[in-house]
Amino acid sequence: MKDYEVVKNAYYDSVTLMSTTVSIKKALNLKDLVMFMGTDMNKDMMESVGLYDKKFDDATPNDLLIGIEMHETIDGWVDQVLDKLSNKTNQNQDQSQTVFKTISQAKQAKDSNIAIISVPGIYAANEAYKALENNMHVMLFSDNVSVEDEIGLKDLAIKKDLLVMGPDCGTAIINGMGLCFANQVSKGHIGLVAASGTGLQEVTVIIDRFGGGISQAIGVGGRDLSEAVGGKMMLKSIDALSEDIDTEVIVLISKPPHKSVLDKILTKIKELNKPVVVCLLDAVVNENIKDVHFVSTLTEAAQKALELGGFKTPDLMTIDKETETFIEKERQLKAKSQDKIKGLFCGGTLTAETLSVLRGKVHDITSNVAKKKDEIMINPMESHGHNLVDLGDDVFTQGKPHPMIEPMIRLDRIIQEAKNPETSVILLDFELGLGSHEDPVGVTIETIDEALAIAKKDNRHLSFVAYVCGTDKDAQNLEKSEAMLKEHGVIIAKTNAHAALIASKIVGGKL
């Protein structure tokens, strides 16, 4: 049974709605639940998942739309949903904080110098312009902002000597403060600029783990290095770190930029008087520039930055004897049909890095983040051969929270892959820190056990390999998270790239 409700003038931010949808669905034992503000884009999304009603037609962006599918009638379901939603909202709010209704009010009252904007895309650019006019840096968490608006915002920011991080920027660390999805890391002298959220997280946590620290970590949004945007904020951020007295080493992280943008970046870094580490996943750069170090993985980027900062690190890509022995035992338990890796990722850049590492080590690998034609996954919903799936892609998250916020999408896919007779290794990433689920490992353990039992019943043996991106300073705690996984037979990797090598070794790939 389906039912619908429009709650007039009841605004909730998208992160709150996404993060509470699954818990409310579980608490009320619902078949399905979607909650969105009444923008045209959100209405289309609700229609696409089959939970739209004509009463939504006249709803405004200030109205909350709720679509529900029940196993059986629930009296007063609207009140129950709103009560749980309000309770969650109140838990997230510090009662001592003052709530301002406009950016101008906040600026006048607090003299703030940065605004984090997380509103529907059609309104985001307008709010970002207001922040810039108030001489505030902008972190634009919102997506669905037009390229034209992005260019206009970044041009204005450059004119006013400000930063626009985004749109669709999920991670930054500014003056020691993590913004949106970020890990708790030590302050130090390594500064980063990244067109990647999880890539930025990965490098910062490795730096923290081996004694280094972060001066600034600036996200610029995945589209910044496109031909249209021209790397405006990457270039501006390089200048900012070059002038920052606390930054002694600069690290740049991105998927391959457009050739014209790459040329601008290379020209810029030739002028710097600080060492630079450049990690452009899968990009081919035939340059020899003094004090500029080109690396191919996020692991290498962190290690080189640490080395330049005077810190020593062990070899993070070697499979030690203990792990080798464990891998050999895993291989002996496999059925003949089991020869494929199934990567189920929350982080898009970690998916891309894994593809880069595994390319040439296993045959016929595909992914929904691939750029090469022969590597593009035909249907991300279906699994055939070696697959690496970014479950944070729009095809999976329409009407549902991102798996870093709520892991349910991945839990269902783990069971799907466990039932596939060709599955040998299930490769997982876990992101700890601000913004992520309060216990991403803990909520996954039961599903891992269920998957192992499914395979065992079919006379097969599954191997789970995991990388936990986090620190012991994160609320979820790195050591605790890794220990939980180990207790349930999961092989723990040192880094994301290391996890890829272990998975390859289990299926007999080249090293």
Image (cartoon, grey):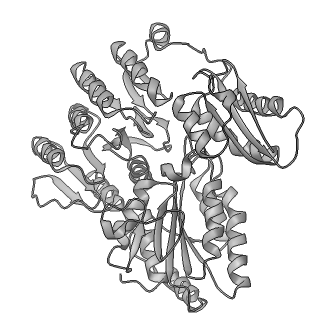
Figure quadrant of residue 381: bottom right
Q: Is residue 296 left or right of residue 101?
A: left
Taking the image as shown, residue 391 lies to the left or right of residue 174, namely right
Residue 326: horizontal and vertical position, in percent? 55, 83
Residue situated in front as seen by the camera: 456 or 6: 6
Q: Is residue 362 above or below residue 399?
A: below
Q: Is residue 431 visible?
A: yes
Viewport quadrant of the C terminus: bottom left
| Residue drawn at x 61%, y 41% as measured from the top left | 47
Q: Residue at x 54, y 68 (%)?
A: 382
Residue drawn at the location 39% of the way across and 15% of the way down: 130
* Residue nearer the viewer, 427 or 17: 17
Q: Position of residue 214 (x, y in %)?
A: 37, 42
In the rendering, at what x and y percent does residue 93 appear?
66, 25
Residue 388, compared with residue 506, is above or below; it is: above
Q: Is residue 73 above or below residue 470?
A: above
Q: Give the x, y percent position of residue 45.
A: 56, 40
- 263 displayed left or right of 472: left
Q: Quadrant of residue 458?
A: bottom right
Q: Quadrant of the N terminus?
A: top right
Kindly tell me whether residue 473 is visible in this rendering: no
